[in-house]
Amino acid sequence: MIPPDDDAVAVQPAFDELGRLSFAEHSLESLLQRVTALAAGVLPGEPVISLTILTDRGPSTVASSGELALRLDEEQYRLDSGPCLAAASTGQTSEIVDTRAPSDWPDFAPHAAAAGCGSVISFPLPVREKVAGALNVYARRFTVSDRRTRALVSRFADYAVVPVSNMYLYESAVERADHLATALDSRAVIDQAKGMLMERFTLTPDQAFRALTRVSMQTNTKVRDIAERFVATGDVPGLPTRHGVAGTGAVADGC
């Protein structure tokens, strides 16, 4: 155990590393794993650490330093009750000083005790840009009532939230950009197919689009895929061609 006066010196390298974590060197998964590994290395008692993140789809463990932490997180998700969920959803530190004693989570605490976890502290990640979560510490060799332990967990969470939330924001922005690019590409090829149909067969925009969607429903194929094939070949079964409607009759029929 590190003497209290030496805490700042002992843990500062980990905090410095948190400040240096960059998007260029890490994926979201590797960054989160590094955060949990650093936490396990600087917090006393050889704990196992996890990170819980809350989204519209519910809670999930995005990283853990050991199987025990993952199992205990998932048990709380199953029960819909426990310190990690309470900390992430309320923004208040939640703890079980002794899993063998009565607690606010009578269903979860015995499960944690049976798994070999003596105490739990879940510290909320400060909310940044709608990223809500908790840093969960599961320990066998110390109690969370220790003020020094609480201070270390609090300080680590304050440092950890910066790279974690920034990486989430970055990943979300990239995902949105990819979706936008895909949507724009789809619109472009559909508009091109519509234009070809309108020019060749004197159709209105609405008639041309209905022709594409009709074939899409008949063949259970995305409109984008129908449009891409038509633009590339000029011949899709069910769509008008230079010689009429492939397989369905006159151009006006079904449009």
Image (cartoon, rainbow, N blue to C red):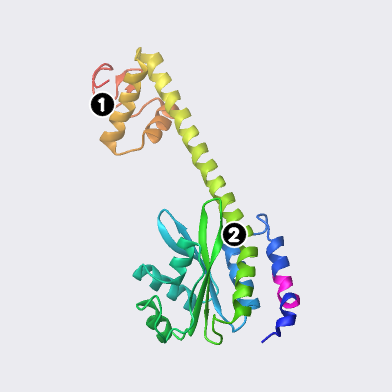
Q: Please report the residue visible at 43 percent of the width from the left and 32 percent of the height from the top.
A: 228
Give the answer, above or below, for where 166 lies relative to 224: below
- Queried whether the magenta region covers residue 152, the answer comes back as no
> Which amino acid, by three-letter code, is at mark 1?
Gly
Q: Amino acid at mark 2?
A: Val
In the picture, the disc for residue 164 is: 2
206 relative to 77, above or below? above
Separation of disc 2 and disc 1 at Cα?
56 Å
Q: Position of residue 52 (x, y in %)?
A: 49, 65
* The one of 66 and 252 positioned closer to us in this rendering: 66
Q: Quadrant of the C terminus?
A: top left
Residue 147 placement (x, y as % from top left): 61, 79
Q: Is residue 145 left or right of residue 253?
A: right
Identity of the residue drawn at 52% across and 43% down:
176
Question: Given contact means CB atoms under 8 Å apart, are the residues at marks 2 and 1 in contact?
Answer: no
Q: Main secondary structure of the magenta part?
A: helix
Q: Secondary structure at mark 2?
A: helix
Please state if 178 lies on the left or on the right of 7 as rendered: left
Where disc 1 sits, the SS reads loop
| Residue 151 coordinates in the image, percent (x, y) | 63, 74
In the visual, does 255 lie left or right of 109? left
Label 2 crowd (10 A; few <14 / some 14-19 / many >=20): many
Residue positioned 38% across, 83% down in the render: 110
Magenta residues span 9-14
Q: Please tell me in which quadrant of the rendered image residue 230 appears.
A: top left
Q: Is residue 237 visible?
A: no
- Precedes in sequence: disc 2 or disc 1: 2
Res 247 label = 1
